[in-house]
Amino acid sequence: MQDMTEIRWHARAGQGAVTASKLLAETALLNGEYIQAMPEYGPERTGAPLRAYSRISSKPIEVHNNITHPNIVVVLDETLLSIVEVLEGIVEGGTVIINTKNSVDEARAALNASADIKVAVVDASGIALDTLKRDLPNTPIVGALAQATQCVTVEAFKENLLETFGKKFTKEVVDANLASVDRAASEVVVG
């Protein structure tokens, strides 16, 4: 991993992007990395577009602002593609991960992404509905992110989930989240 990986999350309130951003950062922290995770809210109502940010670094992080040139962009709601410029500022060779049923080629076309941008797709909502019995795509999308980018390992993320969620939720809920991570990691397609 380079010195610092900057991740910008695009979602709608209620999809768990802020939690996902924090869980990813906590996983990196447990692996000895320096981290930041922060939300950026607009109107605080379910369904409103929001951004969240994560930084992971092998060195202390000295910047404390929003991320304007992300290495990775995560989109939890593909309807945002038509109203938010999700690729704004993405670095050359960056990666965008989208919660969608579309193929990589269809997603690339919808984004109008240049050839140097990696595009990864996973049906995180479908996985969440199957495993969690509700459309909460945050843990599956982190499984896909971990698999597609290796900014943290899938196993490290699952260990963090087990520890964090094990304190708050039933074994059934924890197991469903772990299953959603495994499925997303195996089903993500990168192009």
Image (tube, rainbow, N blue to C red):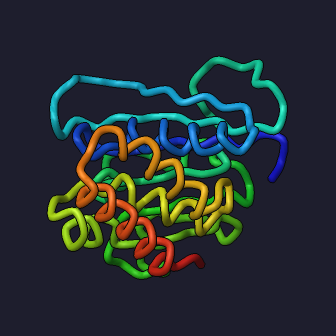
Q: Measuring from the top left, give residue 149's x and y in whole percent.
A: 65, 62
Toward the viewer: 109 or 157? 157
User: Quadrant location of residue 89?
Assistant: top right
User: Quadrant location of residue 39?
Assistant: top left
Q: Measuring from the top left, give residue 142's x and y in whole percent.
A: 48, 56
- Where 85 sits versus 119, above or below? above
Q: Is residue 160 left or right of residue 6?
A: left
Residue drawn where x is 49% and y is 26% of the image: 38
Q: Is residue 156 left or right of residue 180?
A: right
Toward the viewer: 132 or 50? 132
Count of marks placed on residues:
0
State the quadrant of the C terminus. Answer: bottom right
Residue drawn where x is 26% and y is 45% of the image: 169
Residue drawn where x is 54% and y is 30% of the image: 37
- Where 168 sits versus 126, above or below? above
Q: Measuring from the top left, give residue 168's x and y in whole percent.
A: 29, 39
Q: Measuring from the top left, give residue 121's x and y in whole percent.
A: 45, 72
- Where 109 sits versus 176, above or below? below
Residue drawn where x is 58% and y is 63% of the image: 155
